[in-house]
Amino acid sequence: MIHVRQANPLDARQMAELLNRIIAKGGTTARTTSITPKEMQAEMLLFPA
């Protein structure tokens, strides 16, 4: 069984890197510009799971 933990602000760098690769590929997200780790942290605080 796979256990998935809730993301926290320390995960922001890796999450931003992953999202930026998806954005660069195009066609799979509404985002069109890259995101910084600080921006990812801010979004995590604004929109908690």
Image (cartoon, rainbow, N blue to C red):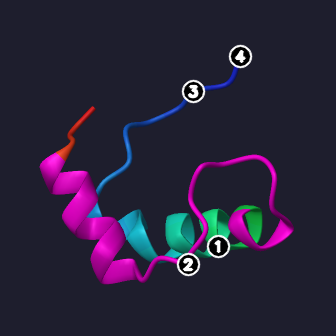
- Helix or strand or loop: what does disc 1 sit on? helix
> Residue pushed farthest top?
1
Q: Which residue is mark 3?
A: 3
Rendered location of residue 6, percent (x, y) = 37, 38
Tell me the crowding category of disc 1: few under 14, some 14 to 19, or many 20 or more residues within 10 angstroms, Cα based: some
Amino acid type at circle 1 is Asn
- Helix or strand or loop: what does disc 2 sit on? loop
Amino acid type at circle 2 is Ser
User: Where are the magenta residues, as a range?
Assistant: 23-46
- Helix or strand or loop: what does disc 3 sit on? loop
Q: Nearer the viewer, mark 4 or mark 1?
A: 1
- Helix or strand or loop: what does disc 4 sit on? loop
Rendered location of residue 37, percent (x, y) = 39, 80
Q: Which residue is mark 1?
A: 20
Q: Residue at x 59, y 50 (%)?
A: 30
Q: Residue at x 77, y 74 (%)?
A: 24
Q: Nearer the viewer, mark 2 or mark 4?
A: 2
Q: Residue at x 76, y 46 (%)?
A: 28
